[in-house]
């Protein structure tokens, strides 16, 4: 039903990841590879953002968080990063068969490329990707002024070329001898980063498409980590960090992703999980700080894009007027 | 194409505006005017309804919404990679002290895996891959796995574990947003599910006591039994709250959701470690269906009622924007204020708050 019938697929169970000889022979080697956070707790990763990269779409954007240090020691990169591309189709009229809609219908599609994460993703969207799509839709629905486009629809299509992992690969190998048994496996910490990236890049693409919005929406992530030394004490040694990279942290207690409208101080999407305790507000505030950080980049990029566009327009107009004045008597041939 | 068709209500803009203004009053007047903002719909609940399942529950709300949950556990072989086994052997031969310690450390740590709990949600009229069932299943799974206590209890030994299948069926059509109901039914089913008592030791093939009276509850009853301070005693419960203007309303019905400014689902569990109130383990915003409602046309812009139709689209837009503060229905824009999130969460988790009330009510069903 939900399986891919059009391609010859590998067995669904997959194979176990290779364990390299050196990690087995040298006892401390695997430990020495563990990445650690070199940024400050409030320091965000640098992001690269560009709009208007898909000419055929009405709006598009690309977001990348470059890998900070590419260690050449192993084949497997120690840290994952983020590469997301978003394109927007529409607003366009709904098909004739569709029922009347008083407002713009938003469809969001989030898809991991098969090679985006360490475990391969299929071609058909799985439940995680559909869930991300719902989150993204919630984030964008409140931002778009939908009533200005009755009887029309817009599609936001996001492809994740590289996504954040849920934990460090070494944990999968070393813990309890069970395949995929790392503490991070399936916890979905990386998904929060992916969602925040999706929100930011979709916001840029929507602005590029020229769809009316109430404000620029931006994604941000914050997390609370436990220090491994005081793992037994519940809140002791809990540190709040912005923009966590899950592979750098062994023990994430709680994390939160928001879609934040800085101009209105409002949240359109909140996704929070883990042992949050009774008061989620510090974590939400941290995530909004991260979102504001991303917003500054988003603003710059959009401003640049607009400047480039108008500069191009004026130059074109000049050229057109020039050509009109100088080459007026061109005979049409053919 | 519209994902939230199930909650689409056929109310006119005038009706929506009326409903909203009555909900925005202080105190709010709800659709069922006998209920306060924190009152839930009344329900009938029973547990152990399915003889073939390890635990089951059925809850019917008085508005016709009904859900059935079955919990089944199976013994499954843990997948082990042979190479890592070799690694462990070598380490014992080489007697690398550091790593032996490391291995021991790992043994005492969390051994459960997230993949050991599988959940499926079935809602009539929806396919498995539709947005609503997927969203509900992931929210329920996420809150269930957040504490980590459950998946550790599924560990039998190094070679075997329990695999828990939680099947959630909505028996009635989705009349209103069913998240809270499904979560309460799952809570009750998990609370009453039992696993056969283990007789074998250590890494032997697991052998179980066939006496059902000797079986152990999945969620241990007495608080002393759970090891460690982090262990949560009871399964989580999800509370749905919506905001209209300054008011916070819990357990909204379908029509009330259609005028909400924002909807929030808060998953919480009552903790043994902290003395006061409940602990939040997951929060998600839910897209309020009010964004899809038709907007009202004021008399001043309607030629049928003596108004003047705006000449151009730009003109129409400016006139619309000026209407924002009037009573003419316009779908809400933007999200929720940050302070509001805090207020909702506080109302849920505080001592004697909504979460505690719900958890205690479900507990008393089990006891009584």
Image (cartoon, coloured by chain):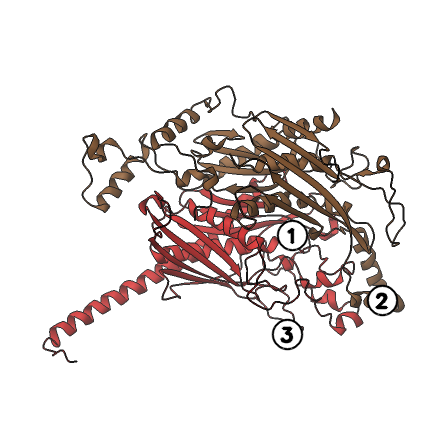
Q: Which image quarter: residue B92?
A: bottom right
Q: Between marks 2 and 1, how big is the CA–CA gap?
A: 29 Å
Q: Looking at this view, is B95 or B159 the one in front? A: B159
B73 left or right, relative to A301: right
Residue holding disc 1: A187
Marks 1 and 3: CB-CB under 8 Å?
no
Could you tell me which quadrant the C terminus of chain B lies in?
A: top right
Q: Chain of mark 2?
A: B
Task: Give me the residue at 63% from left, 31% from top.
Answer: B59
Say few, some or many: other residues with alpha carbon within 10 Å of mark 2 (under 14 / 14 to 19 / 20 or more): many
Q: Nearer the viewer, mark 2 or mark 3?
A: 2
Quarter of the view holding residue A323: bottom left
- Dot 1 and dot 3 within a common chain: yes
Farthest residue toward the left?
A: A329
- Which numbered tag is attached to residue A328? none
C-alpha distance separating marks 2 and 3:
27 Å
Q: Which residue is mark 2?
A: B91
Total labels: the figure holds 3
Q: Which chain is red?
A: A
Q: Is residue A102 left or right of residue A258?
A: left
* Foreground: disc 1 or disc 3: 1
Q: Residue at x 77, y 45 (%)?
A: B153
User: Given the image, what chain letter belongs to the residue carrying mark 1?
Assistant: A
Q: Earlier in the sequence, mark 1 or mark 3?
A: 3
Can residue A227 be seen here?
Answer: no
Kindly state the secondary structure of the residue where label 2 is placed.
helix
Q: Is residue B341 above or below residue A41?
A: above
x, y percent for residue A262: 43, 46
Q: Are marks 2 and 1 on the same chain?
A: no
Residue indicated by mark 3: A72
């Amino acid at each position: 039903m939900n399986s891919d019938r059009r391609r010859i697929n590998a067995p669904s169970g997959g194979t176990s990841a290779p364990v390299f000889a050196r990690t087995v022979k040298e006892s401390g080697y695997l430990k020495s590879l563990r990445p650690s956070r070199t940024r400050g707790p409030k320091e965000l990763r640098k992001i690269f953002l560009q709009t208007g990269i898909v000419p055929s779409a009405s709006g598009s954007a690309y977001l990348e968080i470059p890998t900070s240090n590419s260690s050449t020691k192993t084949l497997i990169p120690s840290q994952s990063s983020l590469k997301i591309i978003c394109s927007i189709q529409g607003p366009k009229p709904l098909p004739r068969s569709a029922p009347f809609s008083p407002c713009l219908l938003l469809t969001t599609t989030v898809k991991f490329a098969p090679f985006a994460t360490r475990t391969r993703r299929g071609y058909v969207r799985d439940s995680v990707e559909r869930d991300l799509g719902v989150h993204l839709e919630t984030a964008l629905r409140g931002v778009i002024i939908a009533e200005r486009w009755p009887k029309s629809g817009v599609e936001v299509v996001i492809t994740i070329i590289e996504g954040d992992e849920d934990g460090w690969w070494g944990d999968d190998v070393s813990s309890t001898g069970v395949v995929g048994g790392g503490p991070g496996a399936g916890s979905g910490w990386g998904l929060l980063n992916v969602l925040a990236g999706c929100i930011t890049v979709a916001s840029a693409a929507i602005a590029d498409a020229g769809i009316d919005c109430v404000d620029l929406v931006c994604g941000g992530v914050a997390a609370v980590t436990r220090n491994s030394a005081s793992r037994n004490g519940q809140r002791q040694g809990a540190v709040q960090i912005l923009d966590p990279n899950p592979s750098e942290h062994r023990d994430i207690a709680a994390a939160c992703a928001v879609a934040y409208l800085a101009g209105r101080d409002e949240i359109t999407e909140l996704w929070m999980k883990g042992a949050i305790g009774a008061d989620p507000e510090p974590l939400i505030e941290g995530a909004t700080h991260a979102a504001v950080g991303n917003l500054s980049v988003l603003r710059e990029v959009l401003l640049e894009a607009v400047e480039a566009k108008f500069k191009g327009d004026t130059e074109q107009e000049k050229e057109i007027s020039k050509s009109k004045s100088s080459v007026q008597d061109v005979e049409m041939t053919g | 194409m519209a994902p939230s068709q199930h909650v689409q209500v056929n109310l006119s803009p005038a009706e929506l505006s009326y409903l909203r203004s009555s909900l925005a009053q202080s105190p709010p007047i709800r659709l069922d005017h006998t209920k306060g903002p924190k009152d839930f719909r009344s329900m009938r609940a029973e547990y152990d309804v399915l003889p073939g399942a390890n635990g089951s529950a059925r809850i019917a709300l008085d508005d016709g919404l009904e859900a059935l949950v079955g919990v089944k556990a199976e013994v499954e072989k843990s997948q082990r990679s042979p190479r890592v086994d070799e690694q462990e052997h070598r380490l014992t031969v080489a007697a690398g002290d550091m790593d032996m310690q490391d291995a021991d450390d790992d043994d005492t740590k969390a051994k459960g895996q997230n993949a050991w709990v599988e959940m499926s949600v079935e809602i009539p009229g929806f396919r498995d891959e539709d947005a609503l069932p997927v969203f509900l299943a992931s929210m329920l799974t996420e809150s269930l796995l957040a504490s980590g206590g459950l998946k550790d209890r599924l560990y039998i030994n190094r070679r075997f574990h329990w695999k828990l299948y939680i099947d959630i069926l909505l028996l009635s059509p989705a009349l209103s947003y069913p998240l809270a109901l499904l979560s309460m039914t799952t809570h009750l089913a998990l609370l009453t599910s039992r696993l056969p008592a283990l007789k074998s030791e250590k890494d032997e093939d697991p052998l179980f006591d066939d006496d059902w009276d000797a079986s152990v509850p999945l969620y241990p009853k007495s608080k002393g039994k759970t090891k460690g301070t982090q262990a949560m005693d009871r399964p989580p419960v999800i509370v749905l709250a919506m905001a209209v203007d300054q008011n916070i309303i819990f357990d909204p019905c379908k029509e009330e959701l259609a005028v909400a400014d924002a909807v929030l689902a808060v998953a919480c569990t009552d903790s043994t470690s902290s003395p006061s109130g409940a602990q939040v383990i997951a929060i998600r915003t839910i897209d309020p269906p009010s964004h899809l409602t038709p907007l009202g046309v004021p008399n001043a812009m309607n030629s049928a009622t003596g108004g003047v139709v705006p000449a151009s689209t730009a003109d129409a837009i400016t006139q619309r924007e000026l209407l924002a503060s009037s009573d003419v229905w316009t779908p809400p824009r933007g999200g929720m204020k940050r302070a509001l999130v805090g207020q909702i969460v506080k109302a849920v988790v505080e001592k004697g708050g909504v979460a505690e009330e719900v958890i205690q009510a479900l507990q008393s069903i089990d006891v009584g």
